[in-house]
Image: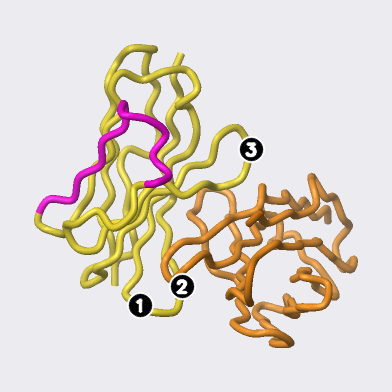
Chain colours: A yellow, B orange
Amino acid sequence: EAGVTQFPSHSVIEKGQTVTLRCDPISGHDNLYWYRRVMGKEIKFLLHFVKESKQDESGMPNNRFLAERTGGTYSTLKVQPAELEDSGVYFCASSQNRGRTGELFFGEGSRLTVL
Amino acid sequence: GNSVTQMEGPVTLSEEAFLTINCTYTATGYPSLFWYVQYPGEGLQLLLKATKADDKGSNKGFEATYRKETTSFHLEKGSVQVSDSAVYFCARASGTYKYIFGTGTRLKVLA
């Protein structure tokens, strides 16, 4: 069974450009999450989808970030326009469990470097 | 507040040495606790977990015990190997679907 896959693995862009990160969760997982790790700091929650609905987007830094999950399958996270402080590793995770928090299955992350 | 604090790295050990990576948390109630590991070039993987006080999670020779008295979940291994070199993240559940992570501790094991 395929795990959580993310694309691209590494993106280098200039300040002001746009980048779109993609996440394919494990098939059948309704819950999809985006997290971010900036400059060796803690991994921080960005948002959570249940199927195609945004359940919680309290961790999104600002309105330059837009996440979508059309059809409740894969998700995209767009950063527009990108700023230097957006550099970091963006992790996607999925889970099937409802109720008490269970295991999240993470992808390898997409490293974003903004110059 | 609600946070997870783990010891700063990097931690460098010789093969077969004893490992402890400290982790403490703040929370209301007794959330589930986790250790995740990220090997070079790979994603985060669940290493072990404990869902209630006094539970001991274990996997691949690693152990961690949920200590509510000290609000800790320290990771230990009796004899590390070079293949254990990775970044280790302590995390706690927040609500029913969110995790709060620590900053990660890089472990380097030398042959």
The image position of residue A44, as x and y in percent, is 51, 46
Query: How far is the residue under mark 3 from the one under mark 2?
Result: 23 Å
Chain of the residue where label 3 is placed in the rendered structure: A
- Given residues B82 and B99, the one toward you in this image is B99
The residue at which mark 1 appears reads as A97
Residue position marked by numbered label 3 in the rendering = A40
Q: To which chain does the residue with label 1 belong?
A: A
Viewer-proximal residue, B96 or A105? B96
Residue drawn 31% across the image and 74% down it: A96
Which residue matches tag 2?
A: A103
Quadrant of the rendered image containing residue B56: bottom right
**At label 1, which amino acid type do we have?**
Asn
Dot 3: what SS?
loop
Residue at 34 percent across and 47 percent down: it is: A57
Instruction: Pick the quarter of the image with the N terminus of chain A.
Output: bottom left
Q: Is residue B47 left or right of residue B18?
A: left
Which one is earlier in the sequence, the residue at label 1 or at label 3? 3
Residues rendered magenta in the picture:
A58-70
Q: Which mark is residue A62?
A: none
- In terms of image quadrants, where is residue A10? top left
